[in-house]
């Protein structure tokens, strides 16, 4: 007995090693088959919070890539949507082209505000392209160089956008009166139109710049100037103009032809 | 034992690196350096061997926990913890008692030789279990040697970076 104890004590490292190694072999054998993996079940219970933290960490690292994917998806969906909504304007069945861009400078305090985008001539930006987001209109390209382009912001008193009441198709002209950056004025809507507060305003598509049916905002107040036959409607925008980062430039495929026709008619 | 806090810090840092950076699934590549092996090298040699065995087992278990690898790293780490005296004798002079090795006092060159041996043995055990079938010997050799090379590079990089602070 004494001898046995002695030999166990002498070889305790070896015995402990064998014990631990057998234990790990047991883990391996037990978890060889994914279906009956007790290790994973054990892990799931114990470590979900650890993996949540890890997921947060890695998704933070990968956010750039995810954002790029989302932008590309949006680009595709937006061009599909616009093309579908504007079949009537597609004179030669070339679909609408959408270029994603990011805002690198934006102003809202002035009466005539401008926006700078990080896409320029080499990305296919042309003059008088419309700049939109999924929730509204941002402006019109005014000038561009190879790398960047300047956009007349919707918050510019000299810009007028053709818009209509979605429900009744009455057209008007949307402009900024220089007050709140979230409120615009829709003028020239005839009194014959039935207008209720909360009606949605969308782009009218009566120009070769913005495609039709892009949501703009809702009517927040109505007023009729004295001795006038037209409404002055207050529109609160869907798009927060003070906080724009990702925008899309729309190329109207038959812009040239439409413009020519307009000129001819006039 | 006054090195214990430092060792625990190393443990946390290396496991963090292993879990958040060198994860084959996160990186989407089949080969990653298992830099946590450095922990096994940093374990003091004057600890009783059963403590080293238990600590090695624990380290391996933590890594298995992170990688869902169910026992593979545990086995490899236990193996290293057990065979450490042998490895030390093989790398350093035959006459040197393993418990006299002070990792922080050795030159980078001899540490690298020691690391290489530890990594090769460790990865051998890991990939024997990962591949599990000797008919896929090509795959085994490829995985074993590529990963070992990456680990040795990673460990050498960390050793170089921390050369001054370890002294």
Image: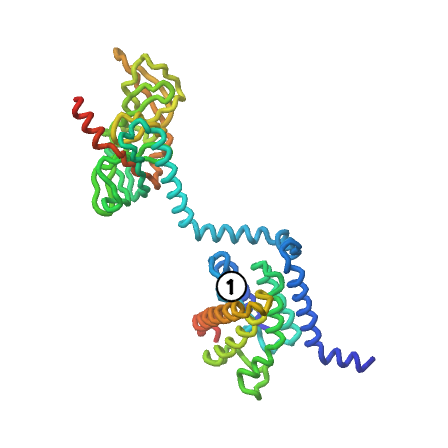
Quarter holding the C terminus of chain A is: top left
Residue A33: x and y, percent? 64, 57
Q: Which residue is mark 1?
A: B13
Q: Nearer the viewer, residue B81 or A34?
A: A34
* Classed neighbour count for the residue bearing mark 1: other residues with Cα under 10 Å, few (<14), some (14–19), many (≥20): few
Q: Nearer the viewer, residue B86 or B134?
A: B134
Quick one: SS at disc 1? helix
The answer to whether residue B81 is seen in the rendering is yes
Residue drawn at x 36%, y 14% as measured from the top left? A194
Q: Quadrant of residue A24?
A: bottom right
Q: Quadrant of residue A119?
A: top left
Tell which subunit mark 1 falls on: B
Is B22 left or right of A1, judged from the image as shown?
A: left
Residue B121: x and y, percent? 56, 74
Q: Residue furthest right?
A: A1
Quarter holding the N terminus of chain A is: bottom right
Residue drawn at x 48%, y 64% as measured from the top left? B31
Residue drawn at x 51%, y 75% as measured from the top left? B115
The answer to whether residue A131 is seen in the rendering is no
Residue B131: x and y, percent? 57, 66
Q: Is B107 placed above or below A236 here?
A: below
Q: Residue furthest front?
A: B135
Residue A13: x and y, percent? 68, 76
Q: Quadrant of residue A6?
A: bottom right
Is B31 left or right of B82, judged from the image as shown?
A: left
């Amino acid at each position: 007995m004494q001898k046995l104890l002695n030999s166990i004590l002498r070889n305790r490292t070896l015995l402990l090693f064998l014990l631990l190694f057998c234990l790990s072999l047991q883990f391996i054998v037990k978890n060889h088959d994914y279906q009956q993996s007790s290790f994973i079940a054990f892990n799931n219970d114990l470590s979900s919070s650890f993996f949540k933290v890890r997921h947060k960490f890695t998704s933070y690292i990968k956010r750039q890539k995810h954002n790029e994917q989302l932008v590309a998806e949006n680009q595709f969906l937006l061009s599909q949507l616009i093309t579908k909504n504007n079949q009537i304007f597609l004179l030669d069945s070339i679909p609408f082209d959408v270029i994603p861009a990011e805002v690198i400078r934006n102003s809202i305090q002035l009466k005539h505000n401008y926006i700078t985008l990080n896409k320029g001539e080499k990305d296919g930006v042309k003059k008088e392209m419309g700049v939109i987001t999924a929730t509204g209109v941002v402006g019109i390209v005014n000038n561009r160089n190879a790398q960047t382009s300047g956009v007349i912001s919707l918050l510019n008193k000299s810009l007028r956008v053709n818009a209509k009441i979605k429900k009744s198709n009455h057209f008007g002209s949307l402009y900024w009166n220089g007050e709140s950056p979230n409120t615009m004025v829709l003028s020239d809507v005839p009194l014959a139109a039935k207008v209720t507060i909360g009606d949605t305003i969308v782009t009218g598509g009566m120009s070769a710049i913005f495609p039709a049916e892009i949501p703009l905002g809702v009517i927040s107040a109505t007023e009729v100037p004295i001795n006038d036959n037209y409404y002055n409607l207050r529109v609160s925008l869907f798009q927060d103009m003070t906080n724009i980062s990702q925008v899309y430039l729309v190329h109207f495929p038959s812009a040239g032809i439409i413009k020519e026709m307009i000129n001819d008619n006039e | 034992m006054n090195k214990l806090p430092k060792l625990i810090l190393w443990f946390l840092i290396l496991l963090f690196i292993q879990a958040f950076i060198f994860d084959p699934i996160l990186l989407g590549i089949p080969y990653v350096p298992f830099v946590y092996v450095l922990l096994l090298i940093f374990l003091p040699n004057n600890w009783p061997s059963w403590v080293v065995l238990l600590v090695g087992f624990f380290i391996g278990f933590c890594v298995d926990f992170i990688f869902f690898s169910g026992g593979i790293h545990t086995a490899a780490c236990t193996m290293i913890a057990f065979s450490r005296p042998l490895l030390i004798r093989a790398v350093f002079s035959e006459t040197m008692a393993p418990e006299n090795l002070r990792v922080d006092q050795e030159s980078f060159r001899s540490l690298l030789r020691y690391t290489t041996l530890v990594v090769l043995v460790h990865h051998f055990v890991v990939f024997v279990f990962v591949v599990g079938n000797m008919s896929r010997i090509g795959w085994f050799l490829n995985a074993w040697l590529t990963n070992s090379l990456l680990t040795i590079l990673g460990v050498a990089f960390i050793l170089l970076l921390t050369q001054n602070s370890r002294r």
